[in-house]
Amino acid sequence: MTSNSTHHYDVLIAGSGGAGLSLALHLADNYRVAVLAKFALTECSTYYAQGGISAVFDDQHDSIESHIEDTLIAGAGLCDPEIVHLTVSQGRASIEWLRHQGVNFTEESGVDGTKQLHLNREGGHSHRRIVHTDDATGKAVSLSLIQRAQDHPNISLLEYHNVVELITAEKLGQTPQRILGAYVLDSKAGKIKTIAAKIVVLATGGANKVYLYSTNPHISSGDGIALAWRAGCRIGNMEFMQFHPTCLYHPSARSFLISEAVRGEGGHLILPDGERFMRRYDERMELAPRDIVARAIDSEIKKRGIDCVFLDISHKSREFIQKHFPTIYMQCLELDIDISQQPIPVVPAAHYTCGGVMTDSNARTDIRGLYAIGEVACTGLHGANRMASNSLLECLVFAEQANQDIRRQFDSIPEPPPLPVWDESQVSDSDEEVVIAHNWDELRRFMWDYVGIVRTNKRLERAMNRLILLKDEISEYYGQFRVTSDLLELRNLVIVAELIIRSAQQRKESRGLHFTKDYPDLDNSRPPQNTILTPTKPTKK
């Protein structure tokens, strides 16, 4: 299963979503870049993103200052104001760069007859500033970037390649500490490759598959967060796991997201008897930030013993609905739900990881040459709760920040030394893969039950007790058998679950996405604090 040869690139990027491909395209004219996709190139959160990208284009009614203020409010006191300003101020330039890459955004005719971008409004935003391609923005962005990357001779797109472990100087007994490359599983060939690179970038997305119900594709198993943690990087704010309020509730549907824009365009959240209930929770009603809406829905479901609530846009015309939400309309129609005539059954589901690998404004982690961009990173933009459609913007802005910093640093970084090949002389093929499936299910179930939208000290303690047993079992299994993609994901998920639980136990207040019945109020005795976990020492292979 081992390949003895070492592959060399200037830059190795793990992840083929909006962040990873944007950075690859920025760098490719000057450097040899490899982009790893754990499965197919399109199997990433970017591809499935419906809503859009937030950016200020309406200079008459909107402003950079307003976008900054909305983001800070949504982040519940934990956003880094400088990072928010940096990100928001680059919104328009990021959109124009995407248009240059071939992304066609939805337009409308202005009062003078000229074409202009159509802007949606979503929860938490005080103005219309969501640039979109109908209700399938991520797909349009993903396909355009993939096409550009496929056409570039300096970009190698490696599908079905999953990072096993980062290679650092410290792990090889060398100083000073820096990144040297990675061991990578080629799932199709059944080989572990050694890839050397001056620069390694984690763009692996979030960790939402740690929960039983998620809107994310199945690749979102926290790989980059776990890899960085094992390598010795700090991890921040993992208690802030965002649950999207409105995931389609249907036994035949894989977790299908009902975009925030449906509420932004006037959709009402109602109980089975037709009553609107959001007025009991927030004066902004359906346009309140996601954490408030998700908790409200969770509360109503548990209080009334119902399976779901409903999102009703049927008071709008069929023509309006088909024009604004063609993907959602057709997906629901295939399940015999005509959203122009009847409400959509919805429940909350795990959606976005607001915490992650600690980075600075240039996307640098604690290890020289190792960068993290996109959902895997904790930049300071989202604070305790990500505002709608700021995520793709973050991917684009920090891909550019990393691009500029890599160019500044590259020539001063020495070439990696010869790297040892992956040693699997002490392991064998597994004849008990049912253990992986069972542990995967158990982990995601107790995380959903005990570390979900509403938490308590007792629930967190129960989750940690179960996790310790599971972690030992997975570690023993990992040490005995050859790695598979499923085993790598499970090993990473159990680390991420521990980071989430530990972070939640440290926060003795309710803030943003973290709500605990034991501490239902904000801790106003001190300024808002980030939860930062530091590994004791890098784990050796």
Image: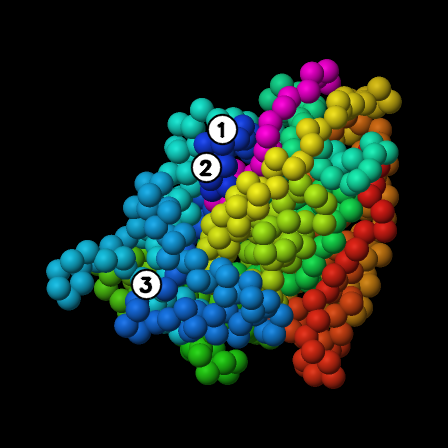
37 in relation to 504, above or below:
above
Three-letter amino acid code at disc 1? Answer: Ile
| Secondary structure of residue under mark 3 | loop
- Estimate the x, y position of residue 240 in percent, counting from the top left: 64, 63
Q: Residues within 10 Å of mark 2 (few under 14, many from 20)?
A: many
Who's the residue at 57% across and 46% down the image?
405
- Estimate the x, y position of residue 255 in percent, counting from the top left: 51, 50
Q: What's the distance in space between the residues labelled 1 and 2, CA to CA?
A: 8 Å
In the picture as drawn, the residue positioned furthest to the top comes out as 4
Who's the residue at 76% across and 74% down the image?
508
Q: What's the distance in space between the residues labelled 3 and 1, CA to CA?
A: 33 Å
| Secondary structure of residue under mark 2 | helix
Three-letter amino acid code at disc 2? Answer: Leu
- Estimate the x, y position of residue 93 in percent, counting from the top left: 38, 54
The residue at which mark 2 appears reads as 25
Three-letter amino acid code at disc 3? Answer: Phe
Q: Residues within 10 Å of mark 1 (few under 14, many from 20)?
A: many
Residue nearest the viewer, comparing 206 with 175 = 175
The residue at which mark 1 appears reads as 155
538 in relation to 161, above or below:
below
Closer to the N terminus: mark 1 or mark 2? 2
Closer to the N terminus: mark 3 or mark 1? 3
- Give the number of marks: 3
Residue 173's mark?
A: none
Image side of residue 115 versus residue 510, left or right: left
Image side of residue 258 versus residue 467, left or right: left
The residue at which mark 3 appears reads as 57
